[in-house]
Image: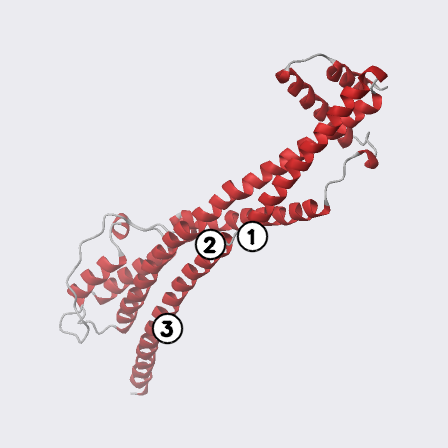
Amino acid sequence: MDGWTKLQSSFSGLNLGQSANKFAKGFNSSVQATKERLGQVSPDEITELPQEYKDLETRVDALRQAHLTLLKITRVYETETYDYPTQIQESLTELGTSIGHNITTFAAANLKGTNLPTPTPTAAPEHQHKTLPHAIGRAAINSASALLIGTTGEDKLGKALHGYAGAWEKISDARVQQDLSIKENFLHPWQATLNNSIAIAMKARQAVRVSRLELDAAKQTLKNASPQKQEAARIEVENAEDDLVQKTEVAITLMKTVLENPEPLKNLNELAKAQLMFYATAAESLSSVQGEIEELSVAAEGEYRKSRDH
């Protein structure tokens, strides 16, 4: 009888109270786990769990990993500045106004007497968004304003930048809405599934592991028990077997419930839908303004060539 087995037997053979007996079981299962890890237990002495259980374990592991992998990337939507270039150094004036405020202020001041609409200036918002779409829009409208100072709105590049900024105002609004929708309808419920149903299934699996270790430790105790202690050790094995069966059944039920849960699919659909709405808005806005910019570009090129012919 080796040292581990002697120590196990001494713990199991003591006349202990309930809490002390629980401690003894915990100690024995820890010894069993250590011996298995060190290769000191032959494979035929390790209780084989049902194939259904092992298959479910593999599938739940894959589900859990899918949640972790996607969360690792999509958590960026919780931070508004995820696409805001660090090298952008916007002035306090630029950061103090939104694209829409800049567009209406610029239009009211620079487009009078032209065939372009001149909206009433809007008040500057309290919050300044720091996203790439917002930054592009601010850069475009501030550039347009600078180009059209002192003109009657005839500078074609200024007009083009004004229209371009308008497109990015719509895209910026869509970007903010996308992020909000993803946080509420994907990130929060996706994390909740990981923290709740998947975590509960993982705890049930841990309970199975502990129960299996306790059973195999009890079998080792029975194997090495003296004749006087054979009956008590046999009863311990039977109790451990019943416990393992019960905990395995519970874990199988919980793992099946997790795998059949339609919530992750619903959440993924919400993620794709929010992204689709954003990109559709971006495509529509840029498609419209690109046509206008192209017209200005063709006109400018025609005027440039005409002036060179004279």
Q: Amino acid at mark 3?
A: Ser
Please tell me which residue is depicted at 56% across the width and 48% down the height of the picture.
Answer: 257
Residue 112 shown left or right of residue 184 in the figure: left
Number of dots carrying numbers: 3
Is label 3 or label 1 in front? Answer: 1
- How many neighbours does mark 3 have within 10 angstroms: few (below 14), some (14-19), or many (20 or more)? few
Instruction: Provide residue 158's location: percent of width, then percent of height.
Output: 27, 69
Residue 19 appears in view: yes
Tell me the mark number nearer the camera, choosing from 2 and 1.
1
C-alpha separation, residue under disc 2 versus residue under disc 1? 14 Å
First reached walking from the N terminus: tag 2 or tag 3? 2
* Amino acid of disc 1: Glu
Mark linked to residue 98: none
First reached walking from the N terminus: tag 3 or tag 1 = 1
Q: Where does label 2 land, which residue? A: 267
Q: Is residue 67 left or right of residue 249?
A: left
* In the depicted structure, whether residue 283 falls above or below residue 300: above
Q: Nearer the viewer, residue 284 or 4?
A: 4
Q: Which residue is mark 1?
A: 260
In the rendered image, which residue does mark 3 sit on? 287
Amino acid type at circle 2 is Asn
Q: In this view, which residue lies farthest toward the bottom?
A: 310
* Element assignment for label 3: helix
Query: Which image quarter: residue 288?
Result: bottom left
Q: Residues within 10 Å of mark 2 (few under 14, many from 20)?
A: some
Between the residue at mark 2 and the residue at mark 3, the CA separation in whole angstroms equals: 30 Å
Can you give x and y, in whole percent of width and height, for residue 21 in the image? 67, 18
